[in-house]
């Protein structure tokens, strides 16, 4: 019986070894990685017009939840990075449009990636480019229509709107519009935040692979740390300087919940 | 007999020549930087000016459909014969006769600037038109809807096709066409320009030359180069307090920028009263007297206007008159009467 077990273990080990080495050999070429952004409110799936309570103890409901993500970078365990071609990386995620929440990064060089980096917002370079480079989600007449400040050229990076009894504004509304890429000729508020997420398991990319990365974005976390933001203290934010506290807060609202390697 | 024919013949030639002037609009349009100007800042590589693009841009510039109620076009407040300002209006009125907060700046020599509006809030000529189109007191229409209205107008697809090779109408293309038109609004043919470039033996009078010298001594720190603007932001002492309009600080949110406004060019002043960001002066004499004796102090007042505790720039009445004589050499009648720029 013992001998049999040993034999079995040896066979199993050999088999594992073979599979592992096979997999390593197979990892070649380029492949896609699909990102799925799952908006959350605490432990629950995010929903509009649903009562939640923020860290300051205020009740609130949402009617709008949109944000830009861009400038994706994939990082391997040894720290080496793959920076995606910048013009391919701009995505406006709109809770009201579920198809916007999932997109695929294509032609990723084969590898085992352990981290994902991106920014919330639109970098300063793209924010000052001529209009020929404002296509897709950056088109101010298209997908980006209500995510652009015309009077202070630049994109709104993050927009949440809704109602709360804590708001003293008309209709108990709150509106948080975060933008500010740092200024064109005069350095001013920069609310671009870089997010770095560690995957709970490696993301295997390459020819014949189609991994899916599920990212949670918790809107209530964006009210929690480092500042327990109170709607009563300010329900309307439309200027970059006063929005920094919100940008600092949403910088930690993302996490990779799980990875499917296929 | 011959004596009678010749004058008639000449008259006919003259008539046909002046008629042709009105029909010059079909000449090829191309961007040429005037010899006495610095290098333009606009990126013409991504959007070169073509005749078809310019003509489409002109039609869009005068298109009232770009406003909520089809009442107001860009050209409503930027009128060609006022050097593309709103003549006689201290602040402009747009849709529903609502008043704006600032004096409409001229649409002129745009290719040499990369920060637009009195507060410099717009960093790209291409993106500029979105601001007045969406502003509730100007044209009050969401830009995406404005583009949709143009899409639904049967006149436009062929024009987009000739301008861009495809009849598909998009926001970026609409903006590029407007940029092509605005980039052609070049004012560089005043008496001063011709004198500066040594054209046609044009000379400046003694007063004009002395005025130029005084201008260079006392004004050109800000009104620099032959664009007559440094394209920067200054507090020129119009007010003590800027609580109603903080100017540049509205964009940067920096206390040191409160009350600063972009230096306007001093070209075409004959056609563009009233003056200053709030249109508070109606004559050039008032403007010059302001610099001589009317400067109001505040924390961000430009240091050039507060030398050793003395406010302003000392200017005698005679000096002011000479400077005005020089400023009058910067009126470019050819620019405001250029039929290519007028509504067709």
Image (cartoon, rainbow, N blue to C red):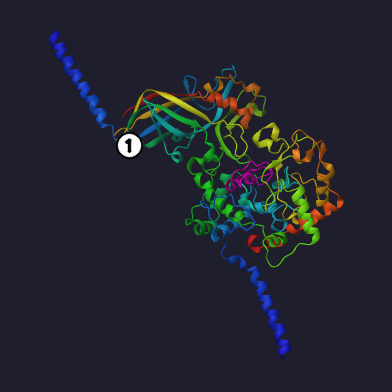
- Reply yes or no: does residue B138 show up in magenta: yes
Is residue A250 visible to us here?
yes
Identify the residue under disc 1: A30
Q: Which residue is most to the bottom?
A: B1
Main secondary-structure element of the magenta-colored stretch: loop
Give the SS element for disc 1: strand
Q: Residue at x 60, y 19 (%)?
A: A58
Image quarter hosting the C terminus of chain B: bottom right
Q: Which residues are magenta?
A: B114-139
Q: Which residue is most to the top?
A: A2
Tag 1: Cα neighbours inside 10 Å, few (<14), some, or many (≥20)? Answer: some
Q: Is residue B9 left or right of residue A134?
A: right
User: Considering only vertical position in the picture, is A198 above or below B112?
Assistant: above
Q: Residue at x 67, y 78 (%)?
A: B13
- Mark 1 chain: A
Which image quarter: residue B36?
A: bottom right
User: Considering only vertical position in the picture, is A223 above or below B41?
Assistant: above
Q: Residue A204, how many percent across, how many down?
A: 33, 29
Q: Is residue A162 left or right of residue B91?
A: left
Q: How many marks?
A: 1
User: A225 or A55, which lies in front?
Assistant: A225
Image quarter hosting the N terminus of chain B: bottom right
- Reply yes or no: does residue A176 show up in magenta: no
User: B190 or A57, which lies in front?
Assistant: B190
Which image quarter: residue A115?
A: top left
User: Considering only vertical position in the picture, is A47 above or below B324?
Assistant: above
Which image quarter: residue B211?
A: bottom right
Q: Residue A156, how many percent across, how many down?
A: 56, 35
Q: Residue at x 82, y 39 (%)?
A: B311
Q: Residue B72, how many percent across, how many down?
A: 67, 51
């Amino acid at each position: 019986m013992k001998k049999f077990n040993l034999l079995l273990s040896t066979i199993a080990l050999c088999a594992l070894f073979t599979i592992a080495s096979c997999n390593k050999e197979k990892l070649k070429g380029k492949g896609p990685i699909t990102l799925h952004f799952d908006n959350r409110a605490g432990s629950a799936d995010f929903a509009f017009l649903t009562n939640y309570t923020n860290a300051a103890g205020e009740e609130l409901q949402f009617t709008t939840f949109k944000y830009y993500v861009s400038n994706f970078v994939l990082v391997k365990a040894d720290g080496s990075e793959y920076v995606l071609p910048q013009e391919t990386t701009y995505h406006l995620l709109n809770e009201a449009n579920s198809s916007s929440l999932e997109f695929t990064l294509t032609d990723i060089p084969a590898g085992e990636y352990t981290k994902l980096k991106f920014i919330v917002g639109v970098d300063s370079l793209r924010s000052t480019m001529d209009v020929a480079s404002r296509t897709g989600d950056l088109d101010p007449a298209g997908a980006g229509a209500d995510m652009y400040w015309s009077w202070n050229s630049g994109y709104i990076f993050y927009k949440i709107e809704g109602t709360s009894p804590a708001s003293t504004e008309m209709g108990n509304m709150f509106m948080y519009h975060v933008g500010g890429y740092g200024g064109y000729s005069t350095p001013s508020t920069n609310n671009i935040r870089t997010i770095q997420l560690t995957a709970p398991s490696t993301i295997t990319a390459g020819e014949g692979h189609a991994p899916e990365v599920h990212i949670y974005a918790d809107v209530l976390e964006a009210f929690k740390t480092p500042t327990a933001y109170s709607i009563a203290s300010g329900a309307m934010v439309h200027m970059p300087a006063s929005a920094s506290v919100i940008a600092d807060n949403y910088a930690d609202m993302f996490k990779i919940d799980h990875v499917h390697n296929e | 007999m011959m004596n009678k024919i010749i004058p008639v013949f000449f008259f006919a030639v003259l008539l046909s020549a002046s008629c042709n002037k009105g029909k010059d609009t079909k000449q090829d349009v191309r961007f040429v930087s005037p010899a006495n100007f610095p290098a333009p800042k606009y990126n013409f590589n991504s959007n070169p000016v073509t005749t078809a693009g310019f003509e489409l841009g002109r039609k869009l510039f005068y298109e009232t459909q770009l406003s909520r109620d089809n009442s107001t076009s860009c050209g409503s407040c930027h009128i060609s014969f006022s050097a593309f300002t709103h003549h006689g209006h201290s602040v402009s009125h747009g849709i529903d006769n609502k008043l704006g907060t600032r004096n409409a700046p001229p649409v002129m020599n745009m290719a040499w600037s990369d920060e637009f509006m009195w507060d410099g809030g717009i960093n790209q000529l291409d993106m500029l038109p979105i601001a007045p189109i969406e502003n509730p007191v100007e044209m009050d229409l969401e830009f995406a809807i404005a583009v949709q209205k143009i899409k639904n107008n049967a006149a436009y697809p062929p024009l987009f096709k000739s301008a861009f090779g495809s009849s598909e109408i998009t926001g970026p293309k609409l903006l590029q066409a407007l940029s092509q038109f605005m980039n052609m609004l070049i004012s560089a043919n005043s008496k001063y320009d011709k004198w500066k470039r040594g054209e046609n033996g044009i000379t400046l009078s003694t007063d004009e030359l002395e005025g130029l010298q005084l201008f260079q001594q006392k004004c050109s720190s800000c009104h620099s180069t032959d664009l007559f603007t440094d394209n920067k932001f200054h507090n020129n002492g119009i007010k003590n307090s800027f609580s109603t309009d903080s100017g540049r600080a509205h964009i940067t949110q920096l206390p040191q920028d409160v009350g600063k406004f972009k230096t306007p060019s001093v070209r075409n002043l004959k056609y563009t009263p009233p003056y200053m960001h709030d249109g508070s002066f109606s004559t050039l004499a008032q403007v010059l007297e302001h610099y001589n004796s009317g400067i109001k102090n505040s924390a961000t007042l430009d240091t050039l206007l507060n030398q050793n505790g003395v406010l302003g720039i000392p200017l005698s009445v005679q000096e002011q008159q000479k400077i005005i004589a020089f400023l009058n050499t910067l009126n470019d009648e050819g620019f405001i009467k250029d039929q290519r720029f007028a509504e067709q």
